[in-house]
Image (tube, rainbow, N blue to C red):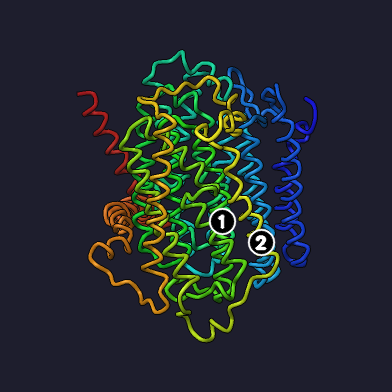
Amino acid sequence: MNGMIKFGYLIPMLPLVGFLINGLGRNFLSKKMVGLIGSGVMVFSFAISLFVFNQVSAEGFNTEILFLFDFIKTAGLDIPFALQFDQLSTLFLLVITGIGSLIHIYSTAYMHEESSTHYARYFAYLNLFVFFMLILVLGSSYVTMFIGWEGVGLSSYLLIGFWFTNNHYNNAAKKAFVMNRIGDLGFLLAIFWMLAQFGTITYAGVFEKAGTVPVSVVTGITLLMFIGAMGKSAQIPLYTWLPDAMAGPTPVSALIHAATMVTAGIYMIARSNVLFSLAPVTQNVVAMIGVATALLAATIALRQNDIKKVLAYSTVSQLGLMFLALGVGAYTAGVFHVMTHAFFKALLFLGAGSVIHAMHHEQDIYKMGGLRKKLPVTHLTFLIGCLAIAGIPPFAGFFSKDEILTAALEKNIVFYVLGVLTSLMTAFYMFRMYFLAFHGSFRGTDEQYHHVHESPVAMTMPLVILALLSIVGGWIGIPAVFAENAHRLSNFLSPVYATTHVQNEMHVSHTTELALMGSVVLLILISIFSAKQFFAKADIAEERSSAFGKLLENKWYIDELYDFIIVQPINQISSFFARIIDIKIIDGMVNGVGKLIHFSARQIRLIQSGQVGSYVLIMVVSIILFFIFQMFWKI
């Protein structure tokens, strides 16, 4: 093994070291030192990732495995703990460590009001989160991936509930943890099934034997894996935890929703493309769940007033589009949108954090307005993020979203229509939020208005970098309709998908693709203009709610439905078991045995009276009983 790959273990190791130093030293390290350590390890990790990526992108590179130690080694079972460096894993390395570094730097200013101890605890959790995410994408087997998979679940629980004195935030953290465990069970069962079926759990071993088993087996395994992906990447029906995860600090939302945790399910399916391509039933399920989630979340985002909630449902919707891409076999398009989404969604969340910071923790967009004059850098970068997510050329989101829609059209026109409808709603609700926050007149209090000021450089610098990436990030995936062989990302990832063949039902010509592309962009511009007409007014009042608007405001009452059909019955059953089964039956039996022994002992002790006459009487009676017994026994 040559080059920087032999030092690849340092990429996840450095955030782990940062976690240990800040976590153990939280009571005596200064805030400056904590921020320097927490951000420094991320920057160094990113630097090593760049060197590794440069080596992997060299012509003729083959996948390299960096063996660390034997995780499980018994007769017939050998599971190494090893890191796999190839085109897919190193691409995710750059996204995770690069955007993770910017979020850490941003956090040094955003979290400055925290005490030194809590400040260090925050950075320790943040470093731990990145460590587990890196293990997830670098593992060379599904067991290693599962270790990282569970680790990010734990870390997200700690970060979402960071302000643990607020019980509402604790409930949000528990909700995320429990709903993720539901999905994780499916993934774990898939791992057991693969181990029983293939005798190995490494990617190379599983993919090599995948074509030798019945399609029904592969379908069962991939469906279980998709259940895991639904939990981690917030798809129907396991998506309701993600909007509640807004309880954590805004940089945490940016980290979880943009570049890391929620993309884990996308990575898992993209990594397992060999298995999923052998299971067309599963692919159809993935596509249908994806497009349904994209559409549902987009409708909810139309009527949310919390700036972070709008972005949260936007994330769920965009994840749905990524799963649509994976479901129709467009794995490169799915990964491409993961990358571009990481740029503009991190930008939007950090921009929202800058607005919240300026508004003294106000998150209601109807209490903002006219902020573009007071927050010029935040305003411009946020606008770029909105244009990118809306899919306006030449911003990053245009290229990746167009590739998904084209792939969907080639597979099924219904998927395409629903994808376009989602894109139109995305443009509308994003610019609704933008115009309400930055245009019109200020609708907050005088105290808030006097407090409004641009964020410090540590917060605006990451915004500017992410804005630049949101502009140029899509240029690595220029479609063939503009220039042949210009899709550098597709060429780069081609070795990962070398054995995957996608059968589409139709092929779209370049002329048709250009016409459709232009039509969609025109419709998106109309959607943006409509949002401007409604929400850029200087004297706008809060929207009046129709019955349907109320339905969207309350998120289709899905949480209430889950509470009615799942939470309340479980609580009632638990109460029954606690009051009747546990206390009266189980405790009754245990306590009854004790009472019986106690009662028996009290009665038997009366025999030991100390009177010789009583003992003689008992002896005589006993002898008579023995004689009677012997007589009847003989008969």
Q: Nearer the viewer, residue 210 or 276?
A: 276
Q: Are the residues flagged by discs 1 and 2 in contact, CB closer than 8 Å?
A: yes
Amino acid type of the residue tagged 2 in the rendering? Tyr
The residue positioned 72% from the left and 45% from the top of the image is 46
Residue 459 locus on image (x, y percent) = 66, 64
Tag shown at residue 254: 1
Q: Can residue 374 be seen here? A: yes
Residue 244 location, quadrant: bottom left
The residue positioned 40% from the left and 21% from the top of the image is 217
The numbered mark, 1 or 2, whose residue comes first in the sequence reads 2
Q: Secondary structure at mark 1?
A: helix
Q: Residue furthest top?
A: 212
Q: Nearer the viewer, residue 602 or 186?
A: 186
Task: Count residues near mark 1 (Cα–Cα under 10 Å), then give few for <14, some for 14-19, many for 20+.
Answer: many
**Image quarter of the N terminus:** top right
Q: Nearer the viewer, residue 93 or 318?
A: 318
Amino acid type of the residue tagged 1 in the rendering? Ala
Residue behind mark 2? 106
The residue positioned 54% from the left and 49% from the top of the image is 395
The residue positioned 55% from the left and 46% from the top of the image is 340
Q: Secondary structure at mark 2?
A: helix
Q: Nearer the viewer, residue 312 or 456?
A: 456
Residue 474 locus on image (x, y percent) = 57, 43
